[in-house]
Image (cartoon, rainbow, N blue to C red):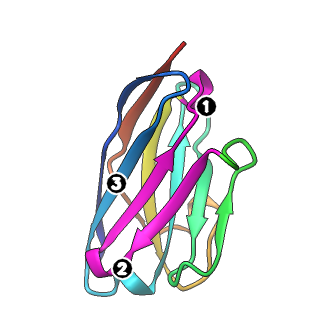
Amino acid sequence: QVQLVESGGGLVQAGGSLRLSCAASGRTFSRYGVGWFRQAPGKERQLVAAISCGSASTYYADSVKGRFTGSRDNAKNALYLQMNSLKPEDTAVYYCAAKSGCAYYTRANEYDYWGQGTQVTVSS
């Protein structure tokens, strides 16, 4: 069992930055692939970033490449998403997720565990 809790969302102006955190419980967190997803009103949940258990491989959606950086700290059972150069279209609820396995996973239905989400709003 892995439990995930996101934090760090808020309201920022376009061009600003936010750092999201995801705190995980569970002794085997280091053996899980993890990801960040987001869902805007009226839209489907979409992948933002996926990270393998050893951080050897990271995948980013085209819409965030060069602006967002996902990372993990297995010693702290934590996952992070540094978001720079934010745009209004980044406004969404952001979720962290985990799946048993050491690859990176790009589909939402592959993940076993999800956090409750944290709201990110970017104003113009």
Rendered residue at 64%/61% (across/down): 107
The answer to whether 44 is drawn above or below residue 106 in the figure is above
Q: CA distance from mark 2 to mark 3?
A: 13 Å
Local secondary structure at mark 2: helix
Which marked residue is nearer to the observer: mark 2 or mark 1? 2
Rendered residue at 64%/76% (across/down): 57
Local secondary structure at mark 1: loop
Comes first in the chain, label 2 or label 3: 3
Using the image as rendered, state which of residue 1 and residue 88 is in the foreground.
88
Using the rendered view, name the quadrant where residue 108 is placed: bottom right
Magenta-tinted stretch:
67-90
Write down the residue under mark 1: 43
Amino acid identity at mark 1: Lys
Horizontal relation, residue 73 to residue 123: left or right: left
Comes first in the chain, label 2 or label 1: 1
Task: Give how far across and how far down residue 51 sits, in percent.
Answer: 56, 70
